Amino acid sequence: MIKTKPDDYQTHLFHDGSYFRSYEIFGSKIITNEAGHVGVAFTVWAPQAVRVSVVGDFNHWNGLENVMEKINTEGIWHLFVPGINEGACYKYEILTRSGSLLLKADPYANYAEVRPQTASVVYQLDGYQWQDSKWRREQKEKDWKKQPLNVYELHVGSWKKKDIVSKSQKYDESDVDTLYNYRELADELIPYLSEHKFTHVEVMPLIEYPYDRSWGYQGVGYFSATSRYGTPHDLMYFIDKCHQAGIGVIMDWVPGHFCKDAHGLHLFDGEPTYEYSHFPVRENADWGTANFDVGRKEVQCFLISSVLYWLDYFHIDGFRMDAIANMLYWNPGDVWQRNDQAIAFLQRLNNAIHENYPEALTFAEDSTDYTGVTTAPEWGGLGFDYKWSMGWMNDVLEYIETHPNERKYCHHNMTFSMAYAHAEYYILPLSHDEVVHGKKSLLNKMPGDYWQKFAGLRLLYGYMYAHPGKKLLFMGGEFGQFDEWKDMEQLDWMVRDYDLHSKMNIFTKDLFALYKRSKPFWQGDYQNQGFSWIDADNSEQSIFSFIRRAEDADDYLVIICNFTAQTHHNYEIGVPAHDRYREILNSDAEIYGGSGQTNGTNYLPVHQEARHNQPCHVTLTIPPLGVSVLRPVRKRKDAEGIVD
């Protein structure tokens, strides 16, 4: 006999907060019942509802035709409707205790109509043939903390558009003709990511959401891949192809709040269900959203089941979790304080992810000074694998937007990060948030003339990729998009035809390739010996020099950054004892659009006099607004100018 509805044990676990794959019983399931009839089993949680009906195109949206059975006192409703097939559109009609009728999308739906339509759609998830077993096997053996991690942040809808010659670059709420679907995106994006040596792509939220300009951060369908870009199987194809190309996929995911659109989770059965009941913390006025009641057991099951769903069915490699600060602290009365139930939930969430998928990565976007974000829950931490270093990002951008002649007065902005670099497992983010809403693009943040802007951006990237911590760059930054991000248009791909943009892209590809193959840049990210200053105090000239080391102490690189437009010849830099060094990257090289103040391909002899607390020194040219990377010469091919 085929079971059509949840049993008592499953519902007990759900209400107890322990059913972390609650998507197995909720939502719409195509089944064959005990009588041999094919149809769809619908199950929904609406604890305060007086009546719940399934309505759809199969019953003319008549709420009196398919009334659901309330199968327990805690408010789970169920109904099997024979004769319904994949593709049927439906909602739940809910009669509230106040007497009003609501039409709600299914919180556990796997698919939805293309916006602006809002109905849920019956969809069969099974059937996609995955071909990523090699990737998944390798991930189980990999420690990303000792690997290069270079993430490309992507907004699918505005990375690239179709037919823009014959259409406007802009699109309205119902226009999907200009958008790449998931399969088309795979064909276009994956070779680009591989060419630029990105290890992962972080996709801005792909759960179903109503309003394009929320970018997915105000969602309604936590189990539904947005239909803007195709079907769930299309998204599986995209992820599968990424994995086959050796690229991980991180999903942006929002655990704290959701949109208030009428068909969504907000006041789902007419009263607080998924949100807090206490009004001062129920809604987020700044964002116009409702806050999840993460202390409620059923909501915990809903959210934890969501992340496991994406891991189980879509082979997602990890989650960047948005707005963690909004969860850690709240104001339930007259004073801001820690939200202990949110802290307990985040610990439970990360434990569930890592117990089921130890290889999955979790990233916290947290702007607070909360300690232990990346510490294991059993040691009192939140359990994330990485924390976005918002302090590093804010300090560096404040410094970089300061005129070079004035940077000596905020020199500490660039050195302060090393005071806490090992407090958490950090990732250095230059994300979409920094290049939108009037903040300017990274290129246009740079002070100075046209040439100096490009030089400054190359320098910023060089400093970033040499600094301890994993990396994240928002799309367009790799070729120096001049305008800030225009979320309703595609990236300004045409600027790559201009000389300095083209050369900027050459530089970023060379920098990313150097980062990926150089152990000193990532193997010691979270170890004391992985970084040491050579000279952190030259504020007058705004020159910073430091050493990055791999686990093998003899495998190291020397990095010199000059944040002024002054060229320095015969500049002495202290270095560890070695016979000679070679410059393996100089952002001022003419091939990158620089002025050519490089140290050539010849080796730099070592002088035995001590400098900067180092036993020896080299004399070299320091390029204007430039970064130089030196490597000790060990092999004959290094001495002959052949770089690995």
Image: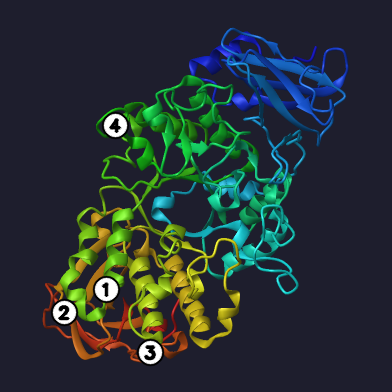
Q: CA distance from mark 2 to mark 1?
A: 33 Å
Give above or below for 244 relative to 165.
above
Q: Are marks 2 and 1 in contact (CB under 8 Å)?
A: no
For marks 1 and 4, give the CA distance. Answer: 39 Å
Q: Secondary structure at mark 4?
A: loop
Q: Does the residue at mark 1 contact the one at mark 4 (Cβ under 8 Å)?
A: no
Task: Name the mark nearer the viewer: 4 or 2.
Answer: 4
Q: Amino acid at mark 2?
A: Cys
Query: Which image quadrant is residue 165 in?
Result: bottom right
Q: Position of residue 606 (x, y in %)?
A: 21, 84
CA–CA distance between discs 3 and 4? 51 Å
Residue 183 lies, in percent from the top left, at 72, 56
> Residue at position x 41%, y 81% from top?
454
Q: Viewed as shown, does residue 526 lie left or right of 171?
A: left
Whichever of callouts 4 and 2 sits on the residue coming sooner in the sequence is: 4
Question: Of helix, strand and loop, which one carries label 2?
Answer: strand
Q: Which mark is residue 591?
A: none
Residue marked by disc 2: 616
Q: Is residue 571 visible?
A: yes
Q: Which residue is mark 3?
A: 601
Q: Nearer the viewer, mark 2 or mark 1?
A: 1
First along the sequence among labels 2 and 1: 1
Between discs 3 and 4, the one toward the N terminus: 4
Q: Which part of the image, by quadrant, shows the C terminus?
A: bottom left
Q: Amino acid at mark 4?
A: Gly
Query: In the image, what residue occupies the spot 23% across and 74% down?
Result: 545
The tag on residue 402 is 1
Give the residue number, with chain letter if any, for mark 4.
380
Quick one: label 3, few (<14), some, or many (20+) residues within 10 Å? Answer: some
> What amino acid is labelled 3 in the image?
Thr
Label 4, label 2: how far apart the Cα atoms are: 45 Å
